[in-house]
Amino acid sequence: MRNRALAVIACVLVIANAVALPLVASTPASAAEATASGEVVLTGESATNGSTYTYSLADATQAENFTVELTGHKSIERESASASALADGDTLPFTVAGTTAPENVSVTFTGTEETRSASWSGTVSDGATDSISVGGNVEATNASVTFTGRENTTADSWSASSQSDGQTQSISVGGNVAPKNAQVTFTGNGFGSRYDNLSQTGLSASGSVSLSVEGSLDPTDGNGGDPSLKVTGYSGGYQKSFNISSQGDYPSGIAFGDSGTKMYVSGEDVNEIHQYALSTAYDVSSASYSESLDIGSLTSHPKDVSFGDSGTKMYIITGADYVYQFELSTAYDLSSASYTKQYDVSGQETNPGGLDIADSGTKMYVTGDSEKILQYSLSTAYDVTSASYSKSFDVSSKVGLSAGIQFTSDGSKMHVVDNWDSTIYHYSLSTAYDVSSATYSESTYVGDQDNGPGGIAFSDDKTQMFVVGVVDDNVYQYSIGGPTDLTVSDGDGHTVSFGDLTDGQTKQKSIPLTTSSTKLDFSASSGGLIDVQLTMQEQDSAKNPSIDVDGDGSADGSYSGMLSNGETASTSLSSLPSGSVSVTTSVSGAPVDWSISADEVNATENPKLDVGADGSFEASYAGVLRSGQTETVDIGNLSTGSNTVAFSTANATSTKWSLTATERDYTEDPGIDLDGDGFMDLRHNGILSPGESSTVTASLSLGAYSAEIDTAGESATAVNVNYTEVSETENAAVIINGHEVPASGTLSEGESTSLDVSADLLQNGENTVTIEVAPNLSADAPTALVDMAYSHTAQTSQTSELNSTAWRETRTVTKTFAGNRSDASIALPFHESVVSVKTAKLSRNGDNLTAIDPSDYEFVNGNIVVNLGSVSKGDTISVQGVGRRVKVHNGDIEIVEPTLPGNALDTKVRIQKTGSGFAIETNSGQVLRAYEESWDNPNDYSLVTASGTQRLSLPNAGNDSTARVEYTPLEVIPERGDAKVSIEDLASRQFHVEGGRVSGDTVKLRWLSVVEDKQYALWSVTHQDTKAVSKANAGGVTFTEDDSPETFEVVKSADAGDSDGIGGPFGLGQSVQSGMVLVLVAGSVIGTYWAQRRWGNGLNGTRDWLVLGMVATATTALGIEIVAPGTLAGLLTTGPVPFVIAAVAGLIVIYYGTAYLPGSRKLRFGYVAVSVGVIGVIGLEVLSPGSVTDTLGPTLASGLDPAIRLGGLVAVGLAGYGGWKWLTSGSGGGSGGSSSGSTATIVIDDNDGGSN
């Protein structure tokens, strides 16, 4: 039974194969029949002037039945000439081209508004009127008046006498604003200034001098500073004494140590050295006895004592002519002294009286009865045993008996005590510590204290001198440096310090005395005398007078300085208000008189303007306007014609005024003279408001026009002359091998005529046929067209077809070869306006046309030359080429460098002639761009229409200029109307779009040069934000925007300056944070799974898994809505999502529904597989329309064709039957075991002997 069914199916397939095979093989049979008939057929549909055909004849004499028929065409082109604002006498030039008078001629006048600024001005006072004349034929607008302030001035003055500090005086200042040129003059009172100096000599450093300072101001030194006090100090002489008789009589030597806090005295009669403690350094009145050193066991009659090496060595000279040296283990402590060595001076002095050791310890000085100062050098410092006599200095001319000697610490001075005449002699040493350089300088008498002075000592600061008196057993203290720490006070709280003054030193300082100073009270820490000299200028004048006139507490006019009685000073006032003014005086010292002068000012106040003098003020300003100050007030509209204006001001003031307005003229009585006879051919009577139009019909002939416009008054009008140019088939001809065969006259639309042709015009080899139509037609006229049918018999068949439109030209040439050729080619001639090849296809012996590889053809001089290679006798070859062409408006171009086959458009053109509105028009969707322009300031743009046309305008191009033109990857598709687009920066994908002749439309923007499946953003360069983000597909990336003026840039989405939350998965972009969604989904799935295992039966069966999947889906949707609200709703209502949901639901229904269908498990699998396949194909078409029909269809066709040719329909049928049997064989199957299915092996042999 199974075999019988198989046989029946096979018979049916054989019959079908028998019927189908002849159909498949019919094309080669038809080609063979054409070869036998031999015919040349040339056709041209909408051919233009210059269209050319070429074909070859082996034997022209065999050509018969030669016919050529031409059919007329009517080409039209809508043209217009317009101007936006033409005034009376202006002209509108335009040209009407074509072969026939234009059709549908109309003239449209559109109202415009002409404006001009007008102004009127003057100077008026309160109540004045003026007249203005307002032009135009409608109300003037933007009227405003500017008031400019004016001022009248009146001089006035005010004064007050003997104004003391803080006194107030009221004055009244006229005018309505602050006066001008205000100034004040101050006049002083009082005796002025005088010197009252004071001097006194020999005043005690602690004395006082009485003062009496007169005048109203504090005294000065005469130069503006404080009074000057000069003080000269002198030594004070004897100060105090200290008696040492309790320790012994006849003191002979003295020394100080430990910074003046210890004093040492040698007692000659007791052979002791006494030590005293001073509670105040170098103040003998604070001395108290400490201890004594007895030297009687060593020597007797100590004459002098000296210390060295920081108090660790002590030296004593005695009447025994020796210098004894002691070591002190504790500096300056006699209790630690011990004798160490001695030095004999008897070789120079036999009765020594004084001793001094230099601070450096390298020199020693001795004096005595010899009246010489003996100098010794110590080779070892402070070691008397190393002493050697060096030199001496004779003092006998002054000194009778030398009893003591002392050098200053720097060795520059030497002091010698004369015991006989009670005098201290002072010497200066030009070389320190060199007695041979000593010279006498002065002396000090001390006999008033003691007639027998002995040793001498000085304080470290050399201001105190100490002398021991042998007669009265005292130590006497003298001040020798002048006063110390001298200060003076004036009795009014002012104190000045002079510091220390040496003997004869003078210091001068300023002391801030006042009128309350009563004395000069001096004090010093040490005595002395002073000479005092005070330089003081007493003052009784007005000092720094000023006045405050605005009450702000600050001076408005002031003078810095003194004004004595009658002395004046003037200064300007920084402020002086009008009205009642309170003047407050500020002055130091004597009272002051003041006088104020100013120019009172009355300025423009409250100016008003009344247009029409009807009592109603259209403009006013409340306030005061100073001179030159302006205020502008809007008025509104002004009626045309004469207007009276009235003015008002307050306080009898005047004002300048300036009235401005915009005079307006609407279009009035517009007319046009078309024929130039001086009379208006068309006119609209009346006024046309802006935008209002009036259209009238007219008639025009061919030629150039300069239409004159007429309007009333100063109005203008917009004019638009619209007409349809007509080019008919005129003076058509066919030129065969250089021989012209004309068709006389004009062929109207559809009218045909046969040309009188003869086979004699043909020639062996190549024949050239050129169509001529309206050869003298101007370049700006509509292109003249003609249809041609050309045929004759020939040994081989050749067909050439021309299909030419305004935007492209299609050529088809078919040739049957009469013999074998090894290097055959076919040429397709195109019109000279074709600039590039869009496609080239080839068919051999009736096969379908297939694309030719660009390397197999050339585009040279307007011809496509296809290299065929080897052909056989009887082969019929068809070649079809589609060439792009352009249309040139109001000009002409020459193609200098056409675009080569296979390349993007990149053509160099020469602009041969340009006119107003010159443009190159194509029907390409890609925006054109010109570059390498030879002219300055190129500003090219394209006007793209919704119908697909594009006009590339080159506004600044001139005759004989050149440029290159190329397609850009940009397509601009207006929804309606047109859009104007220009390429700003091609490398940066930057372009500018705006509305064309009509704005407010939606446009699609598509950039072709992108990477598929990548996200791109449309970035607004104008507004600096991202407009949209879209994913690129095979057709580019597309955005939708309006045509408002804006510059855009297409960038990768990640590079956009502001992604604005667009893009990303599902179109959610950065707004959807996938991590959050994943957390929600994962958490819900895990939670559901745990719940099922905890309280349910786990995941058992399809239903449990389905529940888990539904929970995951629901939580995913919830997560998306939480992160990006509204997203899911958009996906569910738009785009492919509804289909995807329906498809998934359908698959679930099918899967579970197959359980109720008859058949085995394999059959149910087949149901599901077929359903999935069908849904998949539909899904592909929904998501990407054409992806299946445009791809799978041709693929199946190309796949089935070899199968049919190799094996026929029988083999295909057997294969299908085998598949059906497998599906219907039951639920068995699989590997191993027996199977009821059968296996068919199909071998298909290629007709050419190959295998597949």
Image (spheres, helix red, strand yellow):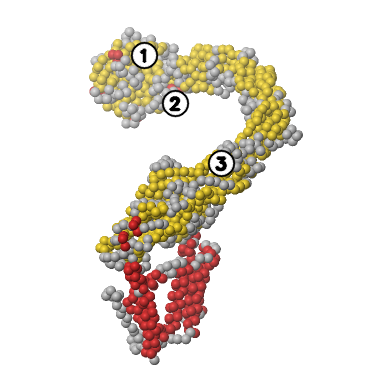
Local crowd size for mark 2, using a 10 Å CA cut-off: few (<14), some (14–19), many (≥20): few
| Label whose residue precedes the other's in the sequence (2 or 1) | 2
Quarter of the picture holding the N terminus: bottom left
Q: Nearer the viewer, mark 3 or mark 1?
A: 3
Which x, y percent locates residue 352?
A: 30, 16
Residue type of the residue flagged with mark 1: His
Residue type of the residue flagged with mark 2: Thr
Per the model, the C-alpha gap separating discs 2 and 1 is 27 Å
Q: Nearer the viewer, mark 2 or mark 1?
A: 1
Quadrant in the picture for residue 130: top right
468 horizontally vs 748: left or right: left
| Label whose residue precedes the other's in the sequence (3 or 1) | 1
Residue type of the residue flagged with mark 3: Asp
| Label whose residue precedes the other's in the sequence (3 or 2) | 2
Q: Which residue is mark 3?
A: 675
- Disc tally is 3
Task: Report the front residue among 1031 and 204.
Answer: 1031
Q: Which residue is mark 1?
A: 426
Quadrant in the picture for residue 389: top left
> Residue at coordinates 46% horizontally, 61% vertically from top-left?
1064
Which x, y percent locates residue 997?
A: 53, 49
Q: Marks 1 and 2: in contact by CB < 8 Å? A: no
User: Compared with residue 846, is residue 547 higher up or lower down, i.e. above or below?
Assistant: above
Per the model, the C-alpha gap separating discs 3 and 1 is 138 Å
Q: Which residue is mark 2?
A: 280
User: Compared with residue 993, is residue 454 higher up or lower down, i.e. above or below?
Assistant: above
User: Compared with residue 42, is residue 622 higher up or lower down, i.e. above or below?
Assistant: above
User: Compared with residue 1046, is residue 1143 higher up or lower down, i.e. above or below?
Assistant: below
Task: Report the front residue among 601 and 144.
Answer: 144
